Image (cartoon, helix red, strand yellow):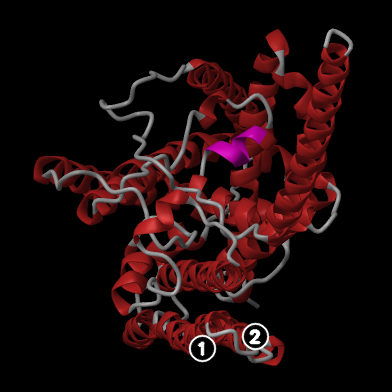
Amino acid sequence: MTSQVPDGLYIWWITCQARIMFQTELFELKRKRKEALDRKYKHVFAIHSKPRTSCLSHEAVDVPSFLGFRNLMVLVLIVGNLRLVMENYMKVGLIATLGLSYGFIISLQHDIRADDIRMGALLYFLIPAHLFVAYLIEIVAASQARLAQSRTKKDEEPPKLRAAWLLIACAHAVNATLSLGVANYVVYYNIHHPMVGTLCEFHAVIVWMKQLSYAFTNRDLRDAYLEGYPTPEIYASCPYPHNITLKNLCYFWWAPTLVYQPVYPRSPRFRRSFFLKRVAEAVGLSLAIWFLSAQYAVPTLRNSLHAMDKLNLPVILERLMKLSTISLVIWLAGFFALFQSGLNALAELLRFGDREFYTDWWNSGSLGTYWKLWNKPVYHFMRRHIYAPLVGRGVNPRAASIIVFTFSAFLHELLVGVPTHNIIGVAFAGMMFQIPLIAITAPLEKGRMSVIGNVIFWVAFCLVGQPLAVLLYFFAWQAKYGRMKS
């Protein structure tokens, strides 16, 4: 009996080791399968998964740092004093004027034509029709998916859907191309007024991006539905294909986001006082922007044309520094009016829970960090529908970032060049020029060097880049339509 005890223990030990090895191999196989599936379904992961507050709101838990604003104030004081020095030099020596403006500002100098109003209103109401065309396409796709799933459950051979999915993708591509293409054609050739054209162009690009997100996300949800791949937990209350409804689409149409999800986190109730405060802020800031543009920016812009025409560099530099201050004030007011007031008012009306439309971009230690923080709706779209799928297909992350910037540069050129009827590539080049600046400022983000990176960000983006772009587009406008036209 004593000799059998060691043998039994040995057999037990061997059995345990074999079981452990089997479980380890099984776990490794499951892990590899999950990684493969995760690389495939890049358009499904939930961007909006929990309620969050904007970091400048009173409800914010963590108060952001305002170190970046301190750096900005110092730079504004320096630029203001340098402008006075340049002005004294000009009074003694060269005296000239220079000009610039932008789509929003030059609109204050020209009467709005009745045809512009009619065409703009017609285009504004027709653009969302393409969203509903996308909805009809998805109804057809959902019916095919239901049919395939029902046959699978009955142990019947499911229909071959590859050709059907290809037709669905082509239909979405044609619909999205027509949406943006027709809008660009109408704005460029039929709407003369830059402000009307800019509003229509912004609306067209927003709806176009929503169309793409709706198509991409439902494609992956459809594949996950057919293959039994689990989707994010937040989608459980409205799984595919129950999300393909008119109500669901209309909510996404108005929701302050560019990424489609069947379900979004919702706030518990509508707060009327919060909503009215945000609306009052948006209206008040919009009036302030109009007043500052009319009383300060436009006269400066009108006095700039001659120096630009003669390439009088001292005057151009003086005007750039003078315009940098007012353009920065207008830009900051516009940022607060849109992202803090306007989007929060819309989110409150729809009880949209995730209100992190921006974070503390003013503290950015590099241009790369700024683009991740200041406009979260666009950043989420780029990351979810362009960057993540490219990386998932094996594209190098740096190359994927360059592709994202190129796409963004293309959209910036459309948003500026089409309404001003001058596609001269300045906005595109300005975005692409930031790629080397991002590489230069990225190492400065850590430690005490972050202050230097933050200063470079403010100088390159706000105190030089924006005024210079405005100058070049206004000069092109005046050369084509204004007083400089021969």
Real-space CA distance between mark 2 and mark 1, rounded to the nearest whole angstrom: 14 Å
Spot occupied by residue 31 in the image (x, y as percentages of width and height):
74, 44
Q: Nearer the viewer, mark 2 or mark 1?
A: 1
Q: Report which quarter residue 262 is drawn in.
A: bottom left
Spot occupied by residue 172 in the image (x, y as percentages of width and height):
58, 83
Q: Is residue 5 magenta?
A: no
At horizontal 39% and vertical 79% (from top left) the residue drawn is 128
Label 1 Cα neighbours within 10 Å, binned few <14 / some 14-19 / many ≥20 = few
Question: Do the CB atoms of the residues marked 2 and 1 lie less than 8 Å apart?
Answer: no
Q: Under tag 2, what secondary structure?
A: helix
Q: Report which quarter residue 436 is drawn in.
A: top right
Q: Using the image as rendered, state which of residue 82 and residue 34 is in the foreground.
A: 34
**Mark 1: which amino acid?**
Leu
Label 2 Cα neighbours within 10 Å, binned few <14 / some 14-19 / many ≥20 = some
Above or below for 320 versus 57: below
Please indicate whether residue 292 sits to the left or right of residue 260 in the image. left
The answer to whether residue 214 shows anywhere in this view is yes
Which residue bears the numbered disc 1? Answer: 147
The answer to whether residue 309 shows anywhere in this view is no
Q: Is residue 372 magenta?
A: yes
**In the image, which residues are magenta?**
369-373
Label number found at residue 165: 2
Q: Under tag 1, what secondary structure?
A: helix
Please indicate whether residue 144 sits to the left or right of residue 422 in the image. left
Q: Quadrant of the N terminus?
A: top right
Q: Using the image as rendered, state which of residue 322 and residue 9 is in the foreground.
A: 9
Spot occupied by residue 475 in the image (x, y as percentages of width and height):
63, 61
Query: Which secondary structure class fits the magenta region best?
Result: helix
